Image (spheres, rainbow, N blue to C red):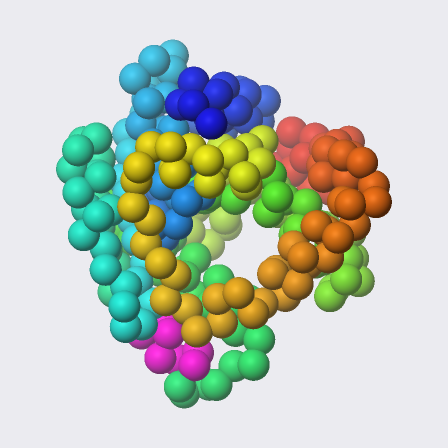
Amino acid sequence: MKLQKLLSYVRRAVDDYHMIEEGDKIAVGVSGGKDSICLLIALKHLQRFYPKHFELEAITVSLGLPGAVYDDIQALCDSIGVPYTVVNTDIGQIIFEERKEKNPCSLCAKMRKGALNTKAEELGCNKVALGHNKDDVVETFFMSLFYEGRINCFAPVSYLDRSKLYSIRPLMYVPEWECRSFVTKSGIDIVKNPCLADGNTKRQETKELLAELSKNYDNLQEKVFGAIKRSQIKGWNGEI
């Protein structure tokens, strides 16, 4: 995928759901994976021509696990002129050593989001951009159905009462394979996920199930994504 196509996806999502307003200061959550790298680069390029002016801050929440090095992200942020902050935490130790969670993803996500939002507030940001792509939307919908017994999905834009921040998801129209293609063709190094549960999660199980279903049902992802957009799930019809 070329930069122009990535920007077209992101611009459409931003415009459709009014994700960016004049004077916004947006914290970009950067894990170092393909999605967050795509998000950071897309927003930086969008910043150059978007009619509403906004600032960017890149933030990485480190889980404190061995093997995570963020020098390449620092170099990328330096090269494109985005301030970069690493938030060091003990989340990995808490989850895997102290609590020994069997299904750690939900708790980890909450703790990482809390650390990210806290730092975003400290830096004076009013919005946090997250790197959820189109596949994540569909997978989250099915995970909610399978594991929680309810029809739900995160919203393109949501307001966080406690932190007074808005969460936005500008990659929501970008298929995962196109994120991977963009990063590969750009020659950008990504940070290997050091999480001990990587590849062995409920999300991975759901991803594999949908891949199997897609062999028998044409355009499954597009149909489900379209159904979510037309649904009454909170946030998908423009309300926050």
Which quadrant would residue 196 be assigned to in this image? bottom left
Q: Residue at x 31, y 27 (%)?
A: 44
Q: Nearest the camera: 130 or 199? A: 199
Residue 190: x %, y % from top left? 33, 49
Residue 48: x %, y % from top left? 30, 17
Indicate left or right for 211 with 169 as reference. Answer: right
Which quadrant would residue 227 be assigned to in this image? top right
Indicate left or right for 17 with 111 as reference. Answer: right
Residue 134: x %, y % from top left? 60, 39
Check the image and report above or below for 219 versus 22: below
Q: Nearest the camera: 178 or 14? A: 178
Look at the image and give the residue range highlighted in magenta.
90-96
Is 13 magenta? The answer is no
Check the image and report above or below for 98 versus 214: below
Q: Residue at x 83, y 41 (%)?
A: 217
Indicate left or right for 103 with 85 as reference. Answer: right
Q: Residue at x 35, y 36 (%)?
A: 40
Does residue 127 appear in this view?
A: no
Quarter containing the C terminus: top right
Check the image and report above or below for 27 versus 104: above
Is 91 magenta? The answer is yes
Q: Residue at x 73, y 66 (%)?
A: 147
Q: Main secondary structure of the magenta part?
A: helix
Residue 106: x %, y % from top left? 55, 67
